[in-house]
Amino acid sequence: MYSSRITGMGFYVPDNIVTNDDLSKMMDTNDEWIQERTGIQERRWIKEGSDDTTSTMGVKASKIAIERAGLTKDDIDFIIFATLSPDHFFPGSGVLIQDMLDMPNVGALDVRNQCSGFVYSLSIADQFIKTGMYKNILVIGSEYHSGALDKTTRGRNLAVLFGDGAGAAVLSRSEDNSRGILSTHLHSQGEHAEVLTVKAPSIIHWIPAILNAKEEDTSYHPFMDGQKVFKNAIVRFSEAISEGLDANNLTAEDIDMFIPHQANLRITQFVQRRFKLSDDQVYSNIQKYGNTTAASIPIAMCEAWEQGKIKEGDLVVIAAFGSGFTWGSVVIRW
Ligand code: UT7
């Protein structure tokens, strides 16, 4: 059987930096609250009038990833695109990327698993490669959150958390079974679907409902029961990591780099303490980009790699938890 290796990575974030002080001019919040509760100092938000969208950011990240893999667009056999903020209700953004990258007739699949979207996408790509169906798969996570956030005091518990950006990786077939993705582990618990959600627009809340919506109707903005999400996140992150380590007869001491979904620095620090990981074993960049949902892991993984923090032969563990609830992990021998 083949194994799949990450051969190239890239990321793109909009130039526009929004600091916590900038937010305090839009809503009743402050730098101290945001940093203390989340670790976030700033995030990138697409500037009004910019050409950036979920799909164009994904294209920019993809071009870098494909080039770094030493490939051209013609070598890519399949596209997997993870997002909760697609350009359109349908079709998905994967086909828009396929067109913009000029990859005629290459299959494109959208994955709608929110913060776990990139973990799910890597797992799907891994199966296609291991079975021999595809050789090189482009896996993308991209989010344009700032367009849908309620940037008033009413929406402050969510608006301060999220940032825009995209990350991409090329997963390629390898004959060396000791390297690459060792295992992936995916879970969900739909009974908590309403704890972190945007209800509209949707087929249930279609145009007449949107047009008649009253100012106090919050269905059109993301909703989150933050404490419930937090409490579940620390449990599920830990379970997913343990599951990945156990499946490969490894322990936390074997981890060279843990890359969590960047949801909240406090969640990451909890997991770090739980597994007794040193600062060198964990990568965090939520301070600069906020929570970019499906894009957060590929952006963090790419940055860590660019900084020389992921080397050949390293054991890299990634894990995510988010809306759905969905969660999972991937164990990689780099
Ligand atoms: O990526 C998807 C997964 N998402 C997560 O994992 C997020 C998990 N949850 C969290 O990270 C945290 O729950 C938050 C950072 C969202 C919130 O932190 P918290 O410590 O749970 O705060 P809270 O929601 O309990 O709110 C505490 C207080 C409230 O005021 P009162 O009722 O105590 O007077 C809020 O109204 O903080 C207030 N508050 C704010 N104050 C200033 C909420 N948002 C803000 C804000 N600025 N932006």
Image: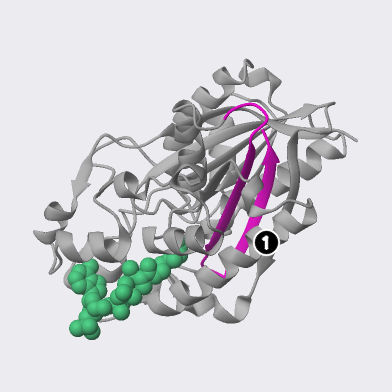
Quadrant including the C terminus: top right
The extreme right residue here reads 1
Mark 1 is surrounded, within 10 Å at the Cα level, by few (under 14), some (14 to 19) or many (20 or more) other residues, namely some
Magenta region: which residues? 311-334
User: For the view shown, which residue lies furthest in the left direction?
Assistant: 25
Give the image quarter of residue 148. bottom left
Q: Position of residue 238 (x, y in %)?
A: 59, 65
**Disc 1 marks which amino acid?**
Ser
Magenta stretch: includes residue 167: no
Q: Residue at x 51, y 69 (%)?
A: 234
Residue 53 visible to an observer of this rendering: yes
Task: Classify 232 as above or below 277.
Answer: below
Q: Residue at x 44, y 72 (%)?
A: 230
- Spot occupied by residue 256 in the image (x, y as percentages of width and height): 59, 40
Residue 267 is left or right of residue 76, and the answer is: left
In the shown orientation, is residue 229 left or right of residue 161?
right
The answer to whether the beta carbon of the residue marked 1 is less than 8 Å from any atom of ligand 1 is no
For the residue pair 260 and 160, the one nearer the viewer reads as 260
In the displayed structure, would residue 237 be above or below residue 67? below
Place of residue 172 in the rendered image (x, y in percent of width and height, measured from the top left): 72, 28
Q: Percent position (x, y) of residue 332?
A: 68, 41
Task: Specify the principal SS of the magenta part.
Answer: strand
Q: Compared with residue 146, is residue 130 higher up or lower down, i.e. above or below?
A: above
Frontmost residue, 261 versus 220? 261
Q: Which residue is found at the position 15% from the left and 66% from the top?
A: 29
| Ligand 1 image position (quadrant) | bottom left
Residue denoted by label 1: 242
Looking at the image, residue 118 sits to the left or right of residue 45; the answer is right
Image quadrant containing the N terminus = top right
